[in-house]
Amino acid sequence: PVGIPSASLLFPSLAGLFGIANLIDIYVTTSEIPPQEQNWEMPDPKPLAVPTFLSAVVSSVMAILPGMTAAQATVVVMSARNFWGRLTDPNYIPADFEHGTQPGFEQMPQMMVFEGMEDLSDDDRLLFQEALSEAGATPDLDLVNNNQQRDLEIIAILSSVNTAVTVMVLGFLYMVGRPRSGAALALNMMYPIDIWNAVEPPADFVRLLAITVASGLFAVPVMIEVGKGMLKMHELVPLRNLVISVSAFITILVYISTDWIGVGTLVIGTMIGLMAPRIGIRRSHGMGVILVPIMMYTFARELDAFGFA
């Protein structure tokens, strides 16, 4: 039926802010999926150990605060990373593309090889090729290598943030009996939770934690093989057709669950999501759609009409 009674407007608002808005940007700026490397290997984990550990610690603290999810933890971690990068390196390039486009990609050597080469003399062309060779052989000058390392670090940080938040939400459920995510809420509704009120953790918490670790270890090799197959499949599907299909599917789901008011919320969320990068801010600020109502509700319960506790 159209308009499910228990449906929430959170789905269309988030789908518009972070889903449809991104898909529209992809449709406008990209006509096809870039060529993918079929034979790739896992990167060296040693350079990623320190940022991954620090991001896990910060996100674990963020997961305890009310109204804070993995999205807010990601903003804090990436902002701290950018601050430290600018503090230690004046030529540091922001890692989370907070300025809309990543400066390192604006003028790559590979993109400039064929631009204006016909106007150069043979000697200048030779010097130019030697400079490109030197840039490729020097790690500090190799923009491609630096950007790849930065991308790997971003992926590792985001993965550690989500993993730490998941574990802390699970621990928070057993420590105070309050679910902080949809999965924790479903877990709390399925069977009674034994509160962690002793030195030793409850047996159910240990089992769930072991399942979380085991599923992560199982998912890594599966992801490698499935990822290679997905790359081949994506090459067969036109990108713009895929974007249109996904957008239409999301719109249909929103209409079925929340009727036309949900579609209107989806449109407004999409407009805000499209506006955010064009005025120089992150889309993650759209999480105020959750934070502001939580703050208003919390303060309304704690304070009277005159603002006194």
Image (cartoon, rainbow, N blue to C red):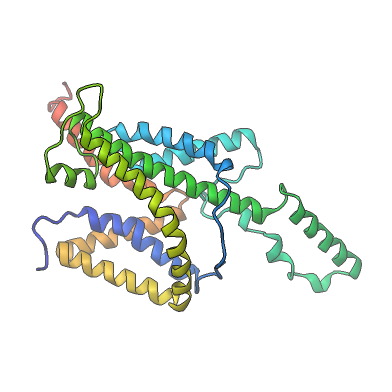
Is residue 295 visible to us here? no
Number of numbered discs visible in the structure rendering? 0
Does 285 appear above or below 119? Answer: above
Nearest to the observer: residue 259 or residue 253: 253
Extreme residue in the right direction: 123
**Residue at the (71%, 49%) spot, across then down:** 139
Q: Quadrant of the C terminus?
A: top left
- Of the 4 image quadrants, the one containing the N terminus is bottom left
Say if 120 sits above or below 99 in the image: below
Residue at horizontal 47 percent and vertical 69 percent from the top? 231
- Please give the name of the residue rendered at 91% of the width and 66% of the height, measured from the top-left corner: 123
* Residue 182 vertical position relative to residue 308 in the rendered view, above or below: below
Query: Depth check: 62 or 235 in front?
Result: 235
| Relative image position of residue 16 (x, y in whole percent) | 31, 59
Please report the residue visible at 25 percent of the width from the left and 21 percent of the height from the top.
199
Q: Is residue 105 left or right of residue 113?
A: left
**Nearer-the-camera pick, 146 or 193:** 193
230 lies left or right of 309: right
Q: Position of residue 33 (x, y in %)?
A: 50, 71
**Relative horizontal placement of residue 117, taking residue 234 as reference (left or right):** right
Q: Quadrant of residue 60?
A: top left
**Is residue 187 in view from this perspective?**
yes
Residue 187: % across, % down:
18, 44
On screen, residue 190 versus residue 99, left or right, reads left
